[in-house]
Image (cartoon, helix red, strand yellow):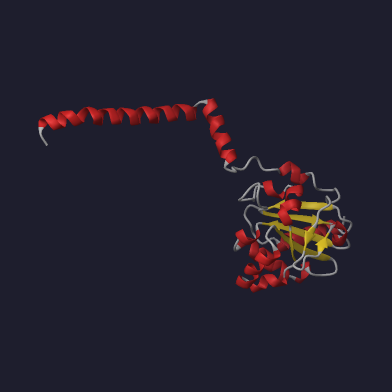
């Protein structure tokens, strides 16, 4: 390269470097300012970024009658609160198809655990998928067929109970996460447990129900 050509290109290179530095500095200033933080938060919210978890809302369910909800089974039959009475019921709100294998393992575990399929205790897994789509899960994990699964159309029941904004929800605002609601024989919520670790909770839940039944 000749000296003249080098001198002609040098100013443009210098200008490019200056522009990059200025833009980077400007972005840093905006991000660091209070208004910049607010703008970033607003942008995050538009993209579905989760807000604060609703621990208080979940706790407020305890010792009150389960709010009126409707769920459907695989045949489209509608179940209401009245159908849940007479047994201790564990409602397991979870992400369904999107939550393999953690939620699936819990559901399958309920289906094979006689403690949760007796005349005293029942476990009902609640997903927002359709019954037809859920057949894909059963085809992949046949053990799921033993589990009592109900479908929450439009996530209406999940939304009503605050299951869409829990700590465990990975798609907060759209899908439940991994939350258990224990309802007594009279339809009163006695215990709520949200588990971001998504562990199998059969023993803990059974022991809790035994404890509650003695009160």
Residue 151 image point, x, y percent: 73, 60
Q: Using the image, determine if residue 141 lies above or below residue 21.
A: below
Nearest the viewer among 207 and 195 is 195
Q: Picture coordinates of residue 150 (x, y %)?
A: 75, 62
Residue at left 29%, top 31%?
A: 16
**Quarter that holds the C terminus:** bottom right
Residue 27 on image: x %, y %: 43, 30
Rendered image quadrant of residue 45 = top right
Q: Residue at x 86, y 63 (%)?
A: 87
139 to 86, vertically: above or below: below
Q: Nearer the viewer, residue 40 or 154?
A: 154
Residue 2 location in percent, x, y? 10, 34
Q: Quadrant of residue 111?
A: bottom right
Q: Is residue 49 left or right of residue 194?
A: left
Task: Give the residue displayed 85% in from the left and 66% down from the top.
Answer: 120
* Label tally: 0
Q: Residue placed at 24% from the left, 31% from the top? A: 13
In the image, taking residue 174 as reference, residue 214 lies left or right, namely right
Looking at the picture, tell me which residue is in the foreground, 187 or 139: 139
């Amino acid at each position: 390269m000749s000296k003249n050509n080098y001198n002609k290109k040098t100013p443009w290179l210098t200008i490019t470097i200056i522009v990059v530095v200025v833009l980077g500095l400007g972005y840093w200033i905006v991000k660091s300012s209070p208004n910049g933080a607010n703008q970033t938060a607003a942008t995050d919210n538009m993209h579905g970024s989760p807000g604060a978890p609703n621990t208080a809302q979940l706790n407020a369910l305890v010792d009150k009658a389960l709010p009126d909800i409707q769920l459907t089974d695989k045949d489209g039959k509608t179940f209401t609160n009245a159908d849940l009475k007479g047994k201790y019921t564990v409602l397991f709100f979870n992400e369904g198809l999107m939550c393999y294998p953690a939620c699936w393992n819990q559901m399958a575990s309920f289906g094979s655990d006689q403690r949760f399929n007796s005349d005293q205790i029942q476990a009902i897994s609640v997903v927002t998928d359709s019954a037809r789509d859920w057949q894909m899960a059963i085809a992949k994990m046949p053990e799921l067929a033993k589990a009592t699964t109900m479908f929450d159309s439009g996530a209406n029941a999940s939304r009503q109970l605050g299951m869409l904004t829990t700590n465990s929800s990975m798609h907060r605002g759209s899908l439940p996460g991994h939350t258990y609601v224990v309802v007594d024989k009279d339809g009163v919520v006695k215990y709520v447990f949200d588990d971001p670790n998504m562990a199998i909770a059969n023993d803990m839940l059974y022991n809790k129900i035994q404890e509650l039944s003695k009160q």
